[in-house]
């Protein structure tokens, strides 16, 4: 379609109250007045999805995945309809569409579905009729005809796939933070904003816990060639961060990230060596953050971010009771990672990450490296201290290897 199409995603913190929704509507109305076509992708109002999850937990320890997804999708029904109403009050012709109406087709996996295809016909028709489209993030239509959701933070993915399918030049992800920082500014006050970061580095930042963007969204953006522009909702004049294809010249640490809540499933007596998700049937390959053999202890550590699971406690209990003595589930784990181009291939970065962990007085449960990351697993009490020491020690955002 046209390059003047703007795809704007507003996160839950930007839509926390009806007052926020009205301010977002005013912003969208201003863009519309300059003749731009606008597709807004909205998350649920701040906190709504977590509240719905806990409601489900109150009535069932093991809710049906189908019903759970239908319940969670109501969060985005509320925000999109309210936003469309607020726009119409401002004289802007707007229509809210759910995931199925927006043409987002997914596989059948509930709670963490993957987008397979986008049928843009309805959205294109609405735009051609001069309307602003307010599309529900986080939800799609599974191949078996059931409603699915795309995993926590999945509205980012909805926005990216819609931007790609509609031919928008870039996708703007608007949030309560004015871009991607070298660490979560709530945890590391010295963190600084990064102007531009490569898709590969951002995927690693997000996969290692930088919740400002969803990792699947950045992977889809890389695949579809959609630049992401991460920026502040209510201070749109601030510069933000561009996420795009680029190749840094040399290894560097671009930032630090961490998962506050990880589950480590330790399996002994492994027999043959099946993939982690076959060993622990409730998991899909994408749920697994790390999978390590410990030859000395003759066991395997499978690490899963809690937010990949609808109910981490129920998961721990059910895995424990099914696999019996062969398995231990540990919930007292957090990770801290240094991320950047080829970081994991440089000995010095691997060694110093362990050094900083010890310097912070933290017990190191495990450490491991990927191409673009080095990670230490520590007790949650120590994570914030280790994170700050990593940030300071690695001289973020751009320590080079030399
Ligand atoms: P939204 O509701 O807009 O989807 P999120 O809560 O998902 O917002 O993401 C924004 C939050 O991400 C920020 O408030 C910030 O605390 C957190 N965050 C974590 N890591 C980073 C980072 N590296 N840069 C910026 N923000 C980060
Ligand atoms: N509302 C969903 C969540 O809280 C999706 C999102 O916000 O992107 O995870
Ligand atoms: Mg988010």
Image (tube, helix red, strand yellow):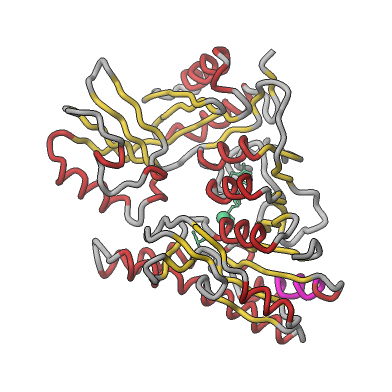
The majority secondary structure of the magenta stretch comes to: helix
- In the rendered image, residue 312, in percent from the top left (x then y), is placed at 32, 50
Q: Quadrant of the N terminus?
A: bottom right
Residue occupying the point 49% across, 65% down = 105
The front one of 354 and 325 is 325
Q: Quadrant of residue 200?
A: top right
Q: Quadrant of residue 17?
A: bottom right
- In the rendered image, residue 256, in percent from the top left (x then y), is placed at 58, 33
Residue 269 in view? yes
Q: Is residue 360 above or below residue 225?
A: above
- In the rendered image, residue 47, in percent from the top left (x then y), is placed at 50, 64
Residue occupying the point 57% across, 15% down = 346
Residue occupying the point 64% across, 77% down = 83
Does residue 248 belong to the magenta stretch?
no
On screen, residue 119 versus residue 3, left or right, reads left
Q: Is residue 7 above or below residue 311?
A: below
Q: Is residue 218 above or below residue 330?
A: below
Q: Is residue 66 above or below residue 304?
A: below
On screen, residue 274 versus residue 78, left or right, reads left
Q: Quadrant of residue 66?
A: bottom left
Q: Which residues are magenta?
A: 23-31
Residue occupying the point 55% across, 70% down = 103
The single residue placed furthest to the left in the displayed view is 325
The front one of 254 and 192 is 254
């Amino acid at each position: 379609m046209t390059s003047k199409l703007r795809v704007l995603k507003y996160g839950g913190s930007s839509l926390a109250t009806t007052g926020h929704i009205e301010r977002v509507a005013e912003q969208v109305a201003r863009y519309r007045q300059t003749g731009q076509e606008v597709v807004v992708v909205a998350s649920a109002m701040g906190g709504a999805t977590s509240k719905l999850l806990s409601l489900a937990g109150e009535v069932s320890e093991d809710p049906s995945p189908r019903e759970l997804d239908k319940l969670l999708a109501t969060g985005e029904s509320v925000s999109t309809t309210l936003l469309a109403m607020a726009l119409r009050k401002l004289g802007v012709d707007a229509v809210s569409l759910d995931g199925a109406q927006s043409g987002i087709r997914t596989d059948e996996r509930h709670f963490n579905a993957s987008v397979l295809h986008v049928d843009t016909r309805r959205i294109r028709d609405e735009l051609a009729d001069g309307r602003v489209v307010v599309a529900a993030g986080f939800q799609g239509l599974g191949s078996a005809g059931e409603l699915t959701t795309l995993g926590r933070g999945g509205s980012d993915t909805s926005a990216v796939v819609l931007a790609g399918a509609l031919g928008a030049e870039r996708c703007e992800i608007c949030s309560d933070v004015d871009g991607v920082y070298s660490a979560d500014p709530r945890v590391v006050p010295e963190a600084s904003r990064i102007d531009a970061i490569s898709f590969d580095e951002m995927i690693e930042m997000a996969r290692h816990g930088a919740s400002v963007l969803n990792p699947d969204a950045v992977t889809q953006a890389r695949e579809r060639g959609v630049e992401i522009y991460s920026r502040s909702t209510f201070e749109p004049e601030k510069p933000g961060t561009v996420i795009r294809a680029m190749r840094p010249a040399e290894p560097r640490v671009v930032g630090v990230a961490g998962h506050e809540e990880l589950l480590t499933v330790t399996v002994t007596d492994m027999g043959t060596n099946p993939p982690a998700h076959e060993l622990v049937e409730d998991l899909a390959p994408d749920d697994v953050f790390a999978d390590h053999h410990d030859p000395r202890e003759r066991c395997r550590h499978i690490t899963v971010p809690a937010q990949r699971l609808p109910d981490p406690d129920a998961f721990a209990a059910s895995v424990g009771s099914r696999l019996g003595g062969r398995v231990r589930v540990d919930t007292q784990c957090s990770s801290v990672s240094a991320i950047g181009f080829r970081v994991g291939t440089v000995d010095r970065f691997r060694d110093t990450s362990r050094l900083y962990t010890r310097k912070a007085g933290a017990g190191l449960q495990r450490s491991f490296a990927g191409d673009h990351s080095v990670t230490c697993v520590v007790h949650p009490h120590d994570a914030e201290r280790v994170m700050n020491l990593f940030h300071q020690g690695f001289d973020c955002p751009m320590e080079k290897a030399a």
